[in-house]
Image: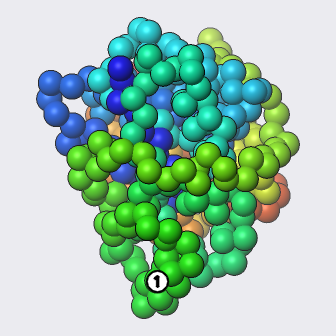
């Protein structure tokens, strides 16, 4: 049986960073896999996790419970039967509802295959200061379904956010374990915590969305001879636009970072080619994290998410102007 954990959390809570930390600290004799789904359709998290040493399976576009869970089932079955991992981490989109996924993982058909352990929910306590987050049904239900709540980004904490977290805990903790960390640095031993939160099975199941049906795994790649393309998505009150560029496209480093830093959107994530190799971009609000390496990624991918409708054309025009001469 594959030990399995659901790693949830709203947009920008630090799920992918936490999973990268867990993968870096996994026992050398174990094979791990990650089933990842994003709100957008171009696979940013898959690119971020590509060199982690784990088996990665992506479900493009929307959330895992779309289409009666069929994309989730196909991805899950593929990993269990072909990869046969010792442990599976499942990262749904930050706009997804965990109940449908937990219902699927506890279904009788998966009982011989899956040893379901604790569900972890990442939380940036600063989000509790903005009413739009606690008022969001998915935000609330992700926390309600968790066995362990990880108060992340403590390095960015303020007295106001700490007070907001304490108020929330007094109302909603319900005896669950709470840990506080920075940069998603949790002990992987937490993954073996048994499930204990039965409220996860009775959380609100309402989940409506308006994003288009996925174009399948082909959405994660460029068609032959196409230099770039963009994909858009919307639902749950959020809107996304992502771009993929071929392996010969290289971006101006400083211009690209300024484009990502100054864009008036909630979220920017990307893995892109620059003259120095690659740059990983992760911006949530004013939090802006970059990482460079002197190796080149197989292509360039970047995505923006915002809580209001956007005209993506100006962002696209500015991005296209940042392309340098293609490499030989």
Name the residue rendered at 72%, 70% in the picture.
Answer: 135
Q: Is residue 60 visible?
A: yes
Name the residue rendered at 35%, 30% in the picture.
Answer: 3
Nearer to me, 271 or 193 = 193
Q: How many marks?
A: 1
> Which image quarter holds the N terminus?
top left
Crowd tier of the residue under label 1, counting other residues whose Cα lies within 10 Å: few below 14, some 14–19, many 20 or above: some
- Which residue ends up furthest to the left in the rendered image? 28
Name the residue rendered at 62%, 12% in the picture.
Answer: 224
Instruction: Tell me how the rendering is colored.
Output: rainbow
Nearer to me, 127 or 141 = 141
> Which image quarter holds the C terminus?
top left
Q: Quadrant of residue 229?
A: top right
- Which residue ends up furthest to the top in the rendered image? 82
Name the residue rendered at 46%, 83% in the picture.
Answer: 166
Q: Would residue 5 appear left or right of 23 to someone viewing this image? A: right
| Rendered location of residue 272, percent (x, y) | 46, 40
Q: Quadrant of residue 61?
A: top right
Nearer to me, 217 or 131 = 131
Q: Is residue 152 visible?
A: no
Q: 32 above or below 135?
A: above
Q: Quadrant of residue 275?
A: top left
Q: Residue under circle 1? A: 166
Q: Would residue 236 appear left or right of 13 to someone viewing this image? A: right
Label 1 residue SS = helix
Q: 58 above or below 113?
A: below
| Rendered location of residue 301, percent (x, y) | 54, 37
Q: 310 above or below 169?
A: above
Q: 54 above or below 83?
A: below
Q: Would residue 8 appear left or right of 31 to someone viewing this image? A: right
- Which residue ends up furthest to the right in the rendered image? 210
């Amino acid at each position: 049986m594959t030990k399995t954990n659901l790693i949830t959390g709203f947009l920008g809570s630090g799920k992918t960073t936490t999973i990268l930390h867990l993968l870096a600290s996994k026992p050398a004799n174990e094979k791990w896999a990650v089933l990842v789904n994003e709100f957008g359709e171009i696979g940013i998290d898959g690119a971020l996790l590509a060199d982690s040493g784990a088996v990665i399976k992506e479900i493009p576009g929307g959330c895992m419970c779309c289409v009666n869970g069929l994309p989730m089932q196909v991805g899950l079955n593929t990993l269990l039967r072909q990869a046969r991992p010792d442990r599976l981490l499942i990262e749904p989109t930050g706009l997804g509802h965990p109940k449908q996924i937990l219902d699927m993982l506890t279904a009788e058909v998966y009982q011989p295959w899956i040893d379901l352990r604790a569900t972890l929910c990442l939380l940036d306590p600063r989000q509790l200061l903005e009413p739009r987050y606690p008022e969001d049904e998915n935000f609330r239900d992700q926390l309600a379904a968790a066995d362990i709540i990880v108060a992340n980004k403590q390095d960015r904490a303020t007295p106001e956010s700490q007070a907001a977290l304490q108020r929330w805990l007094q109302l909603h903790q319900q005896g669950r374990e709470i840990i506080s960390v920075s940069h998603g640095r949790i002990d992987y031993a937490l993954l073996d915590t048994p499930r204990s939160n039965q409220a996860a099975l009775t959380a609100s199941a309402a989940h409506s969305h308006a994003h288009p049906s996925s174009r399948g795994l082909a959405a994660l790649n460029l068609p032959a001879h196409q230099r770039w393309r963009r994909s858009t998505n919307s639902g749950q009150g959020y809107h996304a636009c992502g771009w993929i560029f071929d392996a010969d496209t290289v971006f101006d480093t400083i211009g690209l970072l300024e484009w990502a830093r100054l864009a008036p959107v909630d979220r920017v994530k990307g893995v892109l080619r620059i003259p120095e190799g690659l740059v990983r971009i992760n911006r949530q609000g004013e939090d802006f994290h970059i990482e460079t390496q002197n190796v080149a990624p197989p292509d360039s991918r970047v995505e923006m998410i915002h809580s209001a409708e956007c005209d993506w054309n100006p962002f696209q025009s500015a991005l296209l102007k940042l392309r340098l001469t293609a490499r030989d």
